[in-house]
Amino acid sequence: MMSENNENRDYEHKPSVREHASARREKQDPEAGFEPLSLWFFSICAFVLMIGGGYLGAKSAGFDFGSTQVSGYKAGTPPNFTPAGPVLSERDKYLKSGEAVYKTVCNGCHQFNGRGQGQIPPLVDSEWVINGTERMAQIVLNGIRGPITVNGTSYGAQEMPAQKGALSDQRIAQVITYVRERFGGITDAVVTKEMIADARNRHGDRVAQYTAGELAAEDAMLSGEQPAWMNPEADAAEGETSADGKNSGDVKDPAVNDKAPESKETK
Amino acid sequence: MTDNKQADEDVLRRAAIDRSARLPVLFFFTSAAVWLAISVVLGFIQSVKLYAPGFLDAPWLFFLNYGRSNPAFMGALVYGWAIQAGIGVAIWLMARLCRAEVKNPLTLVVAGHFWNLGVLIGVLGIFAGYGTSMEWLAFPRAVWPILLVAYSLMVVWLITMFQRREPGEVYISVWYILGASFWFPWVYITANVFIHILPGAAVAKAATNAWFMSSMIFLVLAPLGLASAYYFIPKILGRPVYSSQLAKIGFWGLAILGGWTGVQKFMGGPLPAWMPAVSGVAVILLLVPILAIAINHHMTIKGNHSLIETSPTMRFTAAGALAFTVFCILSALSAFFSLGQFTQISQTTMAFQLLAVYGFFSLTIFGAIYFIVPRLVGCEWPSGSRIRLHFWFSTYGIVSLVVLHFVGGIWQAAAYSQFDAPLENAVSAGRPYAIGASIAWASIMVSNVMFLYHLSLMVLRLGRRNENPTLLGHQHPAA
């Protein structure tokens, strides 16, 4: 810093004048004057205060911690307002969850339309889907490999991996229900997570995938209660035609099968 | 004769004070100007990213996406530039007004290094993805204690300085500087505690955040900027401030009301209704002190407007003071739901923040810097036309930015409230304005990169060696 001062001096040869030039030319340090306040100022202040008071009165809702709305607030319905989509029944929610599982897990192989591709068999109208839930649970839990005939066509070049590690009982129950309803047209009974828990107890220890011959019999059903929302009164409230049998019997009625594409659209 | 001698002594005294303040003040100014240059470049980038995310989108530029460049730009602008430059001005003003030489400049320089370190970690942290997503508090959590300690050191220094003052009336600017000294730690600690350490419900965090930003403006930036305006306007005119009574009303009004503001941003939101109501009434009542301050400045300048033409300091300060008044009036109007519903959650937020931080604060501080630096380095600003360009690019830039974001935000918010229309409408409603804003940003960017260059010349003592100040009009000797 010293050297810089020297440098200034060398440059101008008039240190005292130039060095403090800026400090010299400046005006005195400021101070506060004492002009009186004008009446105008006070009138404007009074006006602002009045507005402020009115504002606080109107908006503070009595300083109530519980109230998030200004007093006198009425929720209005905008002119062209249509309430959000239909309220889903318990059963529809269950199927929706099943759809979500299907989309993340099964979709990649069996395709969203359930028709499979190449050596991956279809699920639509498949006898492995419409018939016994016991063997379908076995397939999903432990996977399947080897020759298998679906809808009269033979498959076998590819394997289906076990899903028991990836999916909870609840998820498996939902996806089986969904596949059975959408591709098999079975609407009268659902698979519950208790049923799957039971199946997992019985088959969960298996290490390798099944082959078609090892699966349970065609008509073996998982046993267990249907959930409360499956009873006819609840169904009637939703305007759904309830099927006759509450005990998930074999439903091979072609009329029911025909409903499949229709229920696709309602999803 | 004695008068002359007294005057001579005064000059020497002032020169000695300036010399003692040189190191810390120049340190703060230069590093602040560097941060300003960084932040305006980021500001430009984030403004383009808003509507053209593909801009500068190389894989190694991952950190420039809007979600990072926006908070990084705000952090650099508020903490790197605004507060740092404000402190620089405060140090010099304090030394001048207490008529005492700067002792322990090293304390300040050390504190300044810590401050810069904090801001650096903060900005890099945001780039690396550790930002907190809280507005103006986006630096990673670890940073705030560093900034707090650094600021506290400076406060200790300022208070020590105050205690060494020459006896006599304490000038208005000193009130404001002391105010900002205490209010920043209060506001900053409170906000960080309730957001980072003891976070409550999400809405409470949002409310704290809104309160924090507003309090930073009214209780930290405003006092520092007003301290500068209260000093330089009368100083350059060489006459007293119009009324000390108005000055008191202005100061105490701001002190009492400033800390209640902010939450009005969430009126109609899921908060107890009285919270936004109290904030709303606070910004409305703030019009009283703001009016007092504006009248005071206006009456002081009255009849001497020619100085706004010639003196860089005067011109920047007057523009800044005007921006402050506009900011306060707009804030008060937005407290009413009829306007507020459009300014709550849209581009207008940006208009408000920039009007306060750049339009008011930065312009005022530029004015101070143009006055102070020649006194510290012993030479004059190399070029008056460069100062003029800085002024015009900055004011055109900020005025168009504020207008564009304000109007664009209103369109955007109107589209948002169309609940049955796709959200995309809101995006496209704001889009043309966002594009316009980039052009305004470019102008601000150019002007401040130029300012950094100009300031560097001064710091390197490459200014004009002359007894005459560098002025804006045409009458000054060769620029």
Image: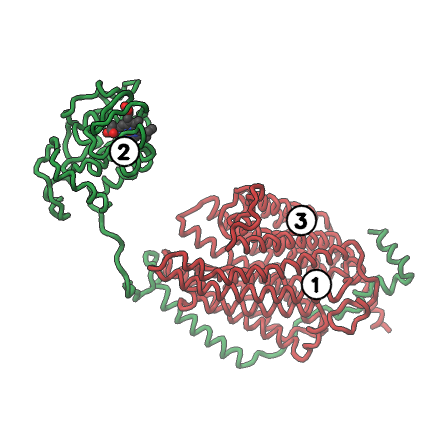
Chain colours: A green, B red
Circle 1 chain? B
Rendering coords of residue B231 (x, y %):
67, 67
* C-alpha distance separating marks 2 and 1: 75 Å
Above-or-below relation of A95 to B284 = above
* Residue A253 lies in quadrant: top left
Residue under circle 2?
A: A171
| In the image, farthest residue toward the left | A244
Split into 4 quadrants, where in the image is the N terminus of chain B? bottom right
Marks 1 and 3 close (CB-CB < 8 Å): no
Judge from the rendering whether residue B267 lies leftward or rightward of residue B286; answer left or right.
Answer: left
Task: Give me the chain letter of mark 2.
Answer: A
User: Which numbered circle lies on residue B97?
Assistant: 1
Q: Residue flagged by tag 1: what amino acid is it?
A: Leu
Question: Which one is closest to the eye, mark 1 or mark 3?
Answer: 3
Badge 1 local density, few (<14 within 10 Å), some, or many (20+)?
many
User: For the residues tagged 2 and 1, is the chain the same?
Assistant: no
Task: Name the residue carrying label 3.
Answer: B112
Amino acid at dot 2: Arg
Q: Is residue B343 above or below residue A51?
A: above
Identify the secondary structure beneath mark 3.
helix
Disc 2 secondary structure class: helix
Q: CA distance from mark 3 to mark 2?
A: 59 Å
Give how far across and how far down residue A94 sits, in percent: 23, 39
Residue type at mark 3? Gly
Q: CA distance from mark 1 to mark 3?
A: 22 Å
Q: Position of residue A82 (x, y in %)?
A: 26, 59
Q: Please provide percent x and percent y for residue B237.
A: 71, 73
Marked residue chain, label 3:
B
Quadrant where the C terminus of chain B sits is bottom right
* Disc assigned to residue B442: none
